[in-house]
Every structure is written in structure tokens, then in C-alpha cells.
Image (cartoon, rainbow, N blue to C red):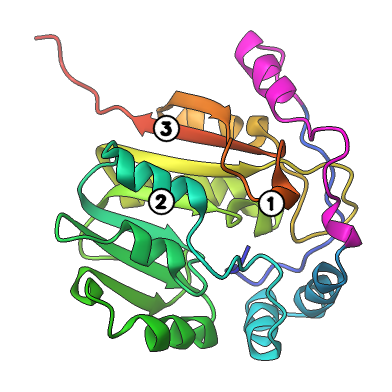
Amino acid sequence: MHALSRRVRFGFASRAPMSSSSSSSSAAAAGRVAAGGRDPSENPAVGRLRELVQRGDAADGWEKSWEAGVTPWDLGKPTPIIEHLVKSGTLPKGRAFVPGCGMGYDVVALASPERFVVGLDISSTAVEKAKQWSSSLPNADCFTFLADDFFKWKPSEQFDLIFDYTFFCALDPRLRLAWAETVSGLLKPDGELITLIYLISDQEVGPPFNNTVTDYWKVLEPLGFKVVVMEDNELAIKPRKGQEKLGRWKRFAHRSSL
């Protein structure tokens, strides 16, 4: 949850209404936070983050959070499930994109001679920190970091793979449709979107905001995205055990039958 764009102030977030379709009902059931899961609002650093982001311009709030070292989402290492997927050899090759990349651990983990990765963050401080620690790594030619606005940035090429983790749930819920439209424009036909979904409920404010599988479903499905995999993240870090779903989505290109 380390990047945000557009000048929207965070307000009170409410749960999204559920669809009456059977697929949405199943997604809603999958999206409920497990009993006993950790409440983000109990973390003092999350409270401080919310103060910074809600104070005025959201982008400025994220910058200040990095300057002050208020980064409660930062694991200090790659996301375990990403390391697992890289080792599995099931990820698309070509070009990959990580929005809200923060320190860039996942960017580096994904990068290889067969996969060039772009990490983007609204915070220039985060991007500078990412560049500093990663510039001398053996695979440094296989990735890059950019400070820019996710909603305004226009790359020269689309991507084969996009990975979103704690970016979607950091966005004001009013921006979620715009998030899906932006992702759709950045992803190649037949490209893959991976969403590591942090399930959260009962939050009066954010970030992170209330978040369910249904929230992704209702903005991605109308744009042609189909779920290939939706499963529990068995490799979630201890505070989030039982609170994460791994979603792998494909936007299938239309093929004429003629």
C-alpha cells in the first residue's frame, strides 16, 4: 500500500454492495476476513500513515510517509508467494510491471534476462531508496524504477504481466474502476494480472481500505478479465495468514471464428 495517485482525499470507506450473481456470491464468501485475523487499525504505524494521507493531497501524504519511515506494509524482502511463482516457472516472460513498488523487492525478485520489470511509485523517496539498494545487483540490467502517477504514466510498450499487492486496497475506493481501466490499458492482450488480495473488513477509514475478492471481480470482469486461479495464499506472512487470496487473471483477446 505504498502509492496513490490523483488528488482525492481519503474519507470513510464502506463495504461495496454484493452482486446477486452466483460468481459474485462465491467471491464474497472468499473475501471475508478470517476470524482472529489482525486488524490493521491496531497497528500504530497504520494510524500514523492514515493521518499523513488524510491530511491533504494523497500523493504528498505517501511521500511524507516514506520520508518519515512510516511504511508498515514494507516486508523488507520479496513477497514469499512471488519468490515461489518465480521458481515455479509459470509466470509470463517479456515485460512485467509492479505499481506501488515501494522499495522494489518484488521488482528485483521478478527480474531476469527473460523478464524485464518496471517498478513504479508515486513517491520519489521510495524510488530513490529502491535504486540505491538494488543498483549493483547481478540482475540490475533487468529492471528499472520510475517515480510517476500510475493513472497518468504512459509507457512505450504494454506488459505481459502486472503484479498488484497492497496497491489496490491503498487506493480510495472511488478510484478502483479507474485502476481496472488503467491496468487493462497497460496489459497486453492475453497478458496476466496477479492480484495478491489482502482481505480487510470493518475499517472506517483507510488506507488500507475494506477489501474483498468481489471488489476486484466487479471492476475487472466487465473489462474482459477472467479468473484463472483464486486460492488462499498459503505463503502469506504470519500477521496475514488466512487473510490473503492469490488471484491470477487473464484478459483473453477476442478471436474471430471466421
| Separation of marks 1 and 3 at Cα, in angstroms | 22 Å
Residue 136 lies in quadrant: bottom left
**Residue pointed to by mark 3:** 249
Q: What element does badge 3 sit on?
A: strand
Q: What element does badge 2 sit on?
A: helix
* 28 sits left or right of 116 in the view: right
Q: Amino acid at mark 2?
A: Glu
Asked if disc 2 and disc 3 are in contact, CB closer than 8 Å, the reply is: no
**Residue 73 picture location, percent across and down:** 66, 65
Which is nearer the N-term, disc 1 or disc 2?
A: 2
**Residue pointed to by mark 2:** 83
**Residue 160 picture location, percent across and down:** 26, 46
Q: Nearer the viewer, residue 214 or 92?
A: 92
Q: Amino acid at mark 3?
A: Trp
Is residue 60 on the magenta stretch? no
Q: Amino acid at mark 1?
A: Arg
One can see residue 108 in this view? yes
